[in-house]
Amino acid sequence: MRHYLDHAATTPLRPESRDEWLRVASNVGNPSSIHESGQAARRELEDARERLAATLDCDPIEVVLTSGGTEAVNLALKGLWWARDPGSDSIVLPDGEHHATLDAVEWLRTREQADVRPVALDEVGRIREAAFVDALESAACATALAANNEVGTVNDVAGLAGRAASSGVPLHIDAIAAFGHVPVSFRGWRGDARAHDGLVAMSVSAHKIGGPAGTGALVVSRHARLTPLLHGGGQQRGLRAGTQDAAGAAAFAVAAELAVAEREAEAERLRGLRERMVAALRERVDGIEMLGDPHARIPGNVHLWIPGALGETLLFLLDQAQVSVSTGSACQAGVPEPSHVVMALGRDDAQARQVLRVSLGVTSTDDDVDAFVAALPAAVERARAASGPRPGVRS
Ligand SMILES: Cc1ncc(COP(=O)(O)O)c(C=O)c1O
């Protein structure tokens, strides 16, 4: 039996979400058509938008549906940049962001001469607030993760949003790894910020919470100034042209409602599994260390530094033992990269290659934990033998 412990990469589709997708997709109708078929699709779509807005604590009109998290992040960052005030040419970019953000900002740097202001993380992966505040000075826009998808650390979003509001800078929050796992409230985080200041946009993605891949949303405050990426039929306040996907929206809404309704009980359950896993690993794997914030973290995320064992070797050996985990970092042309997130925690290149991300979710059981705990020690032994001397071990 396969043990899937990579819920941060993607989650199994919830049966309720799949059924809802099939139900809505079985009816023909473009939500923009005037006739009854179109209007029926429109009702499904708007009902889904309302339900989604309730789970995100925002107004339905603020929910702009997209083809996923990556599009939402690109719309936010490029959209805010293109609509910036003349003379503000800087983007505030914390270290350790997801590649959707890093690569969109890099594109703006090389193509549009954006001045990128990096912000350091602390040793557990939290954004350093004082450095964030310094970087905000007359910036065009800022971005930040609500929770880090690799090491699981949760940021103080209300605090960052308040700082952006006081500095008069529009802020995008990538809530893709946080939504469904920690409380998310667009209204609460935005507070009483004026017009275009503070939190104005927030990205979420359906496949991280049991919904279908290829569906996401950008929550866009009604006061935000945002230039669209796509031009066409003027749908969604002109911010995201294109025929709207009523079935995807409905399936996303069902998954979001379930994730939010079950969140607290599920967090408690996953914390229990996590603690049991960590205690067993400490006994069995010499030198193992947990990275990220031990308290303010995504409940199902376990991020491990295993000195002397290459993450990609462990991943391969665990895969053979029927356990799916991740190193969390990307491959460039098939070559595994050291994790830029782990390096942002102050670890070196060698250490940033000796990590594993285990992410638990709704389908995770004691059995999954036991299988991982049973398979890891032998995998570590083989991976350490394969890498020779242990370069990442600190004295
Ligand atoms: C924090 C974060 N941002 C953005 C994305 C991209 O989202 P999507 O896979 O829906 O394009 C992901 C997915 O891995 C993520 O974890």
Image: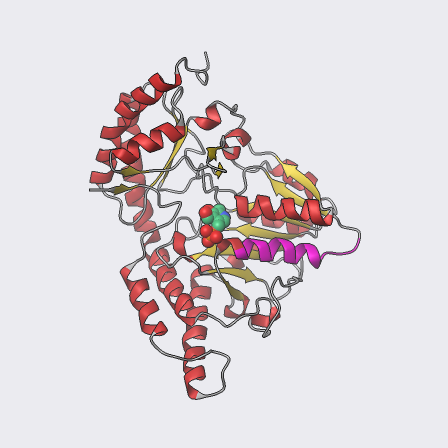
Decide which of 89, 192 is in the foreground and name it. 89
Q: Is residue 369 magenta?
A: no
Quadrant (top left, top right, bottom left, bottom right) of the C terminus = top left
Colour convention:
secondary structure
**Which percent across, then down, holds residue 298?**
40, 42
* Residue pictured at 59% horizontal, 36% vertical: 128
| Numbered range of the magenta stretch | 71-86
Dominant SS in magenta: helix
**Which percent across, then down, holds residue 258?**
33, 59
* Residue pictured at 28% horizontal, 44% vertical: 269
- Left or right, 390 with respect to 345, comes to left
Kindly indicate the quadrant of the structure image that contains residue 83. Answer: bottom right
Decide which of 387, 178 is in the foreground and name it. 387
* Residue extending furthest toward the front: 333
* Residue pictured at 66% horizontal, 56% vertical: 80
**Which percent across, then down, holds residue 12?**
31, 52
**Which percent across, then down, holds residue 185?**
48, 56
* Residue 238 sits above or below residue 181 on the image: below
Quadrant (top left, top right, bottom left, bottom right) of the N terminus = top left
Decide which of 311, 288 is in the foreground and name it. 311
Q: Is residue 84 magenta?
A: yes
Look at the image and tell me whether residue 301 can be seen.
yes
* Residue 284 sits above or below residue 12 on the image: above
Kindly indicate the quadrant of the structure image that contains residue 27. Answer: bottom left
Look at the image and tell me whether residue 159 can be seen.
no
* Residue extending furthest toward the bottom: 35
- Left or right, 15 with respect to 92, comes to left
